[in-house]
């Protein structure tokens, strides 16, 4: 077996690889790596200087900033929800030219007021949960019927006499649960609120409150006499349409058929939404220790599932002998 080989013709002036592939086209000019081009040097200048063997270094070109400056937004404020609602819309109508500055100032005042109030209070509950409280409050031979994930969460508790006169109220939120012997009302936690009040056409008052409150209110099932559950939710939306006053101030209204000073620009504001969420459980009890006739109203939190409240009412009817 024979192997055909191509003879190589080498010389001292030739590269062996070039001789081996002599049938190919001669190599062109050296390829320049343009990724290594210094900042500030144009492509044509870099090509010429690379071929001549020298590269001219120039100072870097500053990048062009195309992003527009952004408006400074105030930090999250407890008054933001109020300023986005109907109250904020009325401010836009009353202070058209300074509405943005007024809103910014009120929002910052709410944050400062709440921070100052928070710095002067100290939570006493130390983050104690409702389950921690129950371990020491539940009596012997007493079983907790309502599971922790179904505790009835209320926003406030109101006690009224037989003439519907309020004689006691707990404004802090909490939970209510059912045991085999009692109804337990528990509340513990840090509460803070911020209020905005208009004092004049050019004045406002921002008030913040903060504090820690806890209460425990047990009611024996033998004291329960009646039960009522109400859930009423509704919404209302209003849009105001108004026009710029004419230059005559409305003096030519009687001659509006030919008066040129008429309203030509009409505007409408954003819809003003008003929601109502009335949800409560009302109990008729003989309040211990003196069996005072009392109507106890649990105002449920708006986000609390209604079917959990239904299960709570069903349990009361099952374990209270006076409701059977």
Image: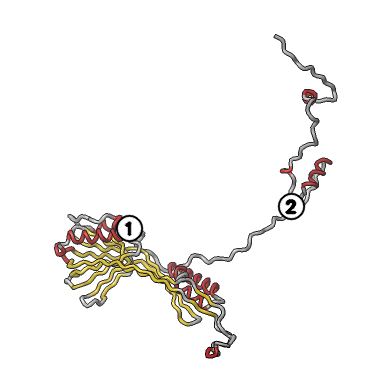
User: Which residue has dot 2 on it?
Assistant: 60
Q: Nearer the viewer, residue 144 or 26?
A: 26
Res. 17 mark: none
Furthest residue to the front? 257
Q: Residues within 10 Å of mark 1 (few under 14, many from 20)?
A: few
* Residue 230 horizontal/vertical position (percent): 27, 67
Q: Earlier in the sequence, mark 1 or mark 2?
A: 2
- For the point 44% across and 77% down, the residue is 197
- Between tags 1 and 2, which lies in front? 2
Q: Residues within 10 Å of mark 2 (few under 14, many from 20)?
A: few
The quarter of the rendered structure image containing the N terminus is top right
* Residue 30 horizontal/vertical position (percent): 78, 36
317 relative to 266 in the view: left or right: left
Res. 129 mark: 1
Looking at the picture, the colour scheme in use is secondary structure
292 relative to 51 in the view: left or right: left
- For the point 44% across and 75% down, the residue is 196
């Amino acid at each position: 077996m024979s192997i055909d080989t191509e003879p190589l013709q080498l010389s001292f002036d030739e590269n062996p690889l070039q001789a081996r592939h002599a049938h190919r086209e001669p190599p062109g000019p050296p390829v320049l790596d343009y990724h290594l081009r210094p900042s500030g040097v144009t492509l044509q200048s870099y090509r010429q200087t690379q071929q001549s063997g020298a590269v001219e270094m120039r100072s870097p070109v500053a990048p062009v900033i195309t992003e527009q400056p952004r408006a400074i937004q105030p930090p999250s404020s407890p008054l933001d929800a109020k300023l986005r609602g109907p109250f904020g819309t009325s401010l836009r109508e009353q202070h058209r030219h300074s509405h943005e500055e007024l809103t910014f100032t009120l929002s910052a005042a709410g944050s400062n007021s709440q921070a100052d109030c928070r710095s002067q209070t100290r939570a006493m509950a130390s983050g104690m949960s409702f389950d921690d409280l129950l371990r020491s409050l539940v009596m012997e031979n007493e079983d907790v019927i309502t599971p922790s994930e179904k505790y009835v969460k209320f926003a406030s508790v109101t006690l009224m006499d037989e003439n519907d006169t309020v004689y006691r109220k707990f404004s802090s939120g909490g939970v209510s649960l059912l045991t085999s012997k009692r109804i337990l009302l528990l509340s513990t936690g840090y509460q803070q609120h911020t209020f905005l009040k208009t004092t004049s056409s050019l004045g406002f008052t921002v008030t913040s409150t903060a504090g820690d409150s806890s209460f425990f209110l047990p009611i024996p099932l033998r004291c329960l006499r009646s039960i009522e559950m109400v859930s009423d939710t509704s919404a209302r939306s209003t849009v105001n349409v108004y026009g710029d006053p004419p230059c005559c101030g409305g003096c030519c209204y009687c001659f509006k058929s030919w008066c040129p000073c008429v309203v030509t620009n009409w505007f409408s504001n954003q819809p003003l939404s008003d929601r109502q969420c009335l949800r409560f459980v009302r109990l008729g009890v003989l309040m211990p220790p003196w069996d005072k006739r009392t109507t106890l109203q649990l105002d449920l939190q708006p986000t609390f599932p209604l079917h959990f409240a239904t299960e709570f009412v069903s349990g009361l009817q099952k374990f209270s002998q006076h409701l059977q």
